[in-house]
Amino acid sequence: MSSFPIERSHNGNLKCPEALGSVAEKKEFDFSKALDRPRALNIERQRSCDERSMVELSIGYSPRHLVTKSELTSRLADHVDHLHSPLLKSGINTPRSPTWDPHPLTSEAWEALRRSLVYFRGQPVGTIAALDNSDEKLNYDQVFVRDFVPSALAFLMHGEPDIVKNFILKTLRLQSWEKKIDRFHLAEGVMPASFKVFHDPVRNHETLIADFGESAIGRVAPVDSGFWWIILLRAYTKSTGDSSLAEQPECQKGMRLILSLCLSEGFDTFPTLLCADGCCMIDRRMGVYGYPIEIQALFFMALRCALQLLKQDAEGKEFMERIVKRLHALSYHMRSHFWLDLKQLNDVYRFKTEEYSHTAVNKFNVIPDSLPDWVFDFMPQHGGYFVGNVSPARMDFRWFCLGNCVAILSCMATPEQSTAIMDLIESRWEELIGEMPVKVCYPALESHEWRIITGCDPKNTRWSYHNGGSWPVLVWLLAAASIKTGRPQIARRALHIAESKLLKDNWPEYYDGTSGRYIGKQARKFQTWSIAGYLAARMMLDDPSHLGLVALEEDKQLKPLLKRSNSWTL
Ligand code: GLC
């Protein structure tokens, strides 16, 4: 990656001057260094596992890259000492004093975030989903795994890793619980969606209660929780330089259990992961069943993180081999079949159907008539994105923020695709950012489609909640993605919009309307991940060296975007 001293427009358009920031903001920063730079200065940069090419770990998936098992073992051993970039001792547990003036909102946000802390037997173990007493609690009084991620990042960036460690260990214990829905046992590796602390006043004793989907509305297991857990374990390790947590046998086992779930063989013909509706951030019926982009991107990211964290014992190595093979297949599949830009859209528009045999171009038999009208206008001249879902005769053309940002952070997207995603965000600013960043998906389902796809869900009416609502939490992902692509001004501009409203509106969970102008119909106030997402984004923009906690470097071996057809010959 090269450095981008100032914002540049990839589509040749002139940028809005307010998006360009001050001269001081434009000072040169090499974002490629941010990925691996230890947070303290004067530490010799150590080679991290991010830089390890997967080909170094590969076994026989391609004749060009064939290595023997013993070679593999010794190569892995070479790298074991270089897994992580440690902090200077003084950096741990002591918030660094910033050299810039912190934004006035940050102190309010930190206070609100600290109020959301949840303690178990005297130790902080997570943050509550929302501290809104005015509304029915439902499960908003729980610690959600996915919701805790931005909190964890904020605490790590602030030099407070203990709560993150406690959270990782507590959720790991919950994973080992026996999980049952009706008479059906859930797999061992499933991580909880959420947990809460139950205080027994009689015995004056605290216990944890967890939900693995058996209490959740819709009874869906959270596929994303395990992936977030692995991603968080890497972020903790990267931030603190303390690899002893990840190396604990329990953590290694927890990781292997999650991995066995998603790497297991079945009847699949695709390397992507088949999921039920509601298995991720969008946890209600929204037509994301099948192969949702959010899960595929998190899956890819978690696999790459696990590759860095697994120990090279016999079990670990076996998993590493499986991961490497899967990553190759998954990146090929995603980069070629999920990617949509103007050219690809035109190709789909002209697709022949009913092609049989290996030479088929329209592999999934997508019928051009299924192209929605909006996509022709939405697609900019320059830009592109990973569509929501691809499966037989079904392409969900909707744009989803989380999956596309994680695709950039994990390098599931090629550098060109990453640039194109940011181009699209700039070109479709009104639609995707508007008056509150960021639209969870675009566009909304309306009328008949809404009835059929959501099952008439009154919470997911058009341009509300998961159905085209705007979620402030997503701003941390936008910030990370824009820093990684060398275009921090995009996030700066979005954050500026968020900063003008979030505190005043008491940190809503989501906003409604085509441009996100209204506080969401049923939005909770003091939603923790809106607060923490803001803080994480602000801290990353103020100090881009934090980016390394959530972004991986490109793996050169995954780079070439192979031709769409004839993959069977490769
Ligand atoms: C809603 C969201 C989900 C989140 C939960 C707690 O159910 O859809 O993503 O984890 O609230 O905030």
Image: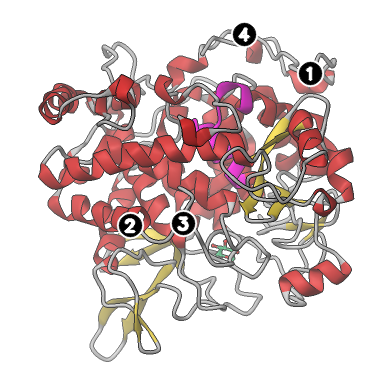
The secondary element bearing badge 4 is classed as: loop
**How many other residues sit within 10 Å of disc 1, few (<14), some (14-19) or many (≥20)?**
some
In front: mark 1 or mark 4? Answer: 1
Q: Residue at x 56, y 41 (%)?
A: 358
**Mark found first going from the N terminus, 1 or 4:** 4
Compare residues 67 and 93 and report the one nearer the observer: 67
The secondary element bearing badge 3 is classed as: helix
For this orientation, the residue located farthest to the bottom is 202
Identify residue type, mark 2.
Ser
The residue wearing badge 2 is 264
**Mark found first going from the N terminus, 3 or 4:** 4
Q: CA distance from mark 3 to mark 4?
A: 35 Å
Identify residue type, mark 1.
Asn
In front: mark 3 or mark 4? Answer: 3
In front: mark 4 or mark 2? Answer: 2
Q: Residue at x 57, y 27 (%)?
A: 541
**Mark found first going from the N terminus, 4 or 2:** 4
Was residue 28 drawn as part of the magenta stretch in this picture?
Answer: no
